[in-house]
Amino acid sequence: MTTRATRGPRRRTVVALAVILTVLATFVVRLVDIQVVRADEHVSDSLKLMGEGSEIQGRRGSIVDANGTVLASSILVYDAQLSPRVIMLLEEQDPKLPWAEASEKIAAITGQTGEEVRKIVSDALAQNPDSQYAELKKGLTTEQYIALRDLGLSSYLSMPSRETRVYPNGAVAGNVLGFLDSSGEAQAGIEKLEQECLAPVNGEVSYRKGKDGVVIPGSERTVDAVNGGSVQLTINSDLNWYLQQMIAEEAQEQGAKGGTVTVVEVKTGKIRAAAEWPAMDPNDLNSSTPETRYSQIFLKDFEPGSTFKAITAAAAIEGAGLTPLSTVSASSRETFPNGAVINDSFNHPAYNYTLAGGLIDSSNVALSKFGTTVSPEVRYDYLQRFGVGEKTLGFPAEVGGILHPVSKWDNQSLYTTTFGQYFTVTAPQLAGAYQAIANGGEKIDLSLIESCTGADGSVVTPDAPAHEQVVAEKTAAELTRMLENVAVQGGNADRIQVPGYRVTSKTGTAQVPDGNGGYKNGVYYTSMVGFAPVDDPQYVIVVTLDEPTKVVSSAATASAFQKAVTQVMKSYRVMPSTIPMDELLPKFG
């Protein structure tokens, strides 16, 4: 029989047992959660707490020219650091090499004075008597590192290494190569365009330690770094160097803000030179300005002016059945039926111009009449065919130029588009248009990259460039004959002759926009384009000058064009023309 006296202790026992079982169950559930349900997560956390390691840096790949000359590479440099506190402690212990003597030896290696080295330490101690860090000098070479190491001062001198980018040829193609920022990130040019090829994949050394700091045997793990690949360009750096020096001299001689030379191989579309002034040296960014750190060849667009009269001629030949001997009457200033007023650059009475003659005299009025023998839509189509409005190769920040739709052509631009106004191009687009003419009407996309060679030796080449027959071969031949006549009979004929070679040429004198919908008065962006040799076209050369002031017409580019063509023929040992020009070339008047 259960009494009140026995029920009390039993109840307390049951309650206590229940509490104990509850607590035990809680621990079991928690244990299952830790060891089973969330085991991976907790193991990972524990390894993070126990694990240590360091990153193994891969090296950024190099950039080389078409002949293998290194234009950009990465090297190790060393940043020397001192421990001022340790130096002072050693001084109190009568060191083998007193600080006064050690500082002189250090300075002789780093290019400083002993006084400068000692001041670095004294200044650090003045700020903090227990200072363990003072920067001695950054960017030391391997030779300097070895010399400092051999002094035996490792107790207070450390020299951690880092990778830095160097450009052995300085400013040669510097604007095209681009540069890295202080953190090693590509900012422009080939460095940015080919980031995927050039960038390394860093590795890692990791291990785990016990609570006493001893590495746990078998816990070491190494993931090797993979160096970046090497990018080979189509550019010939020797040719680029010459053209940079030349265009710098010519631009300054003409009082221009800048100048460029672009060279394209006719049969491949490869860019063999991209020279410009002002030039940027990627080794010394501080000597350049934000405006001169990028390639104006790809980032500057301009109205091509008369250089695109050849494209108008192509549209008229194929769209209206004209020939080089088709004629129109044109005076130096005419008012057209829709009220548009067109002027030539020189005064003259009404001439009976042939199409070829209109190109030779570069008559805006004549080309307006020849060009409007086809519809605006046809001319727009031909401008597109020759590359207006499309980027050439996706160069970082490259502009594609402006090609307004026909619906936006007004009474004036209906005619100005026949002679290179109311649309813009870049120097590579202009070179690409003339490459098509020189190549029998077949346009080949321009290229700047030959290949990427990985650290394992594997070679990756870009997709083959697109080919398009933009005009018939017969049309291209007629345009070539007319453009050679321009070189022979035009106003710059005497200044652009290249002994032994038959060349084509066409000038452009583009007005410069004032930013308010009009043009600057008396200010021009001048250009000249052509190819050689005519009997077997090999190279297209484009020369531009930005706002020359000594000679403001396209004649300002004549000397630079002649020098550029001459050097290109010499650099590639192009065979001289075999048939005398006078025996082959018809004269179009």
Image (cartoon, helix red, strand yellow):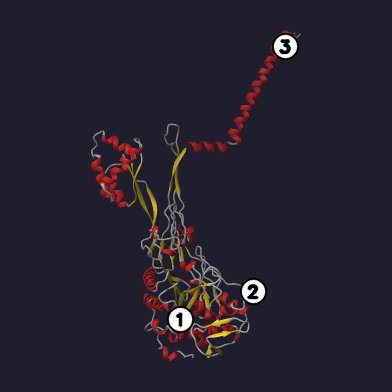
Q: Measure how far apart labels 3 and 2 are at the Cα level.
A: 104 Å
Three-letter residue code for mark 3: Arg
Residue at which label 1 appears: 505
Label drawn at residue 7: 3
Give the Cα separation between the discs numbered 1 and 3.
119 Å
Nearer the N terminus, badge 3 or badge 2?
A: 3
Callout 2 touching callout 1 (CB < 8 Å): no
Residue 294: % across, % down: 45, 63
Q: Return the residue nearer the eye: 507 or 394.
A: 507
Q: Mark 2 points at which residue?
A: 407
Q: What residue type is labelled 2?
A: Ser
Seen from this angle, which residue lies furthest right?
Answer: 1
Q: How many labels does the image show?
A: 3
Circle 1 Cα neighbour tier, 10 Å, few/some/many (<14 / 14–19 / ≥20): many
| Of the two numbered discs 2 and 1 in the rendering, the one whose residue sits closer to the viewer | 2
Q: Nearer the viewer, residue 108 or 222?
A: 108
User: Residue 27's spot in the image, x, y percent?
Assistant: 61, 27
Few, some or many C-alpha atoms within 10 Å of disc 3 (few <14, some 14-19, many ≥20)?
few
Res 549 quadrant in image: bottom left
Q: Quadrant of the N terminus?
A: top right
Whichever of labels 1 and 3 marks the residue nearer the N terminus, that label is 3
Is residue 448 visible from the viewing direction of this image? no
Q: Is residue 404 above or below residue 89?
A: below
Q: Residue 382 carries which label?
A: none
Q: What residue type is labelled 1?
A: Ser
Marks 2 and 1, how far apart at CA: 32 Å
To which quarter of the image does residue 207 belong? Answer: top left
- Against 172, residue 436 (above or below) is below
Mark nearest the camera among 3 and 2 is 2
Left or right: 43 as drawn, with respect to 553: right
For label 3, the SS is helix
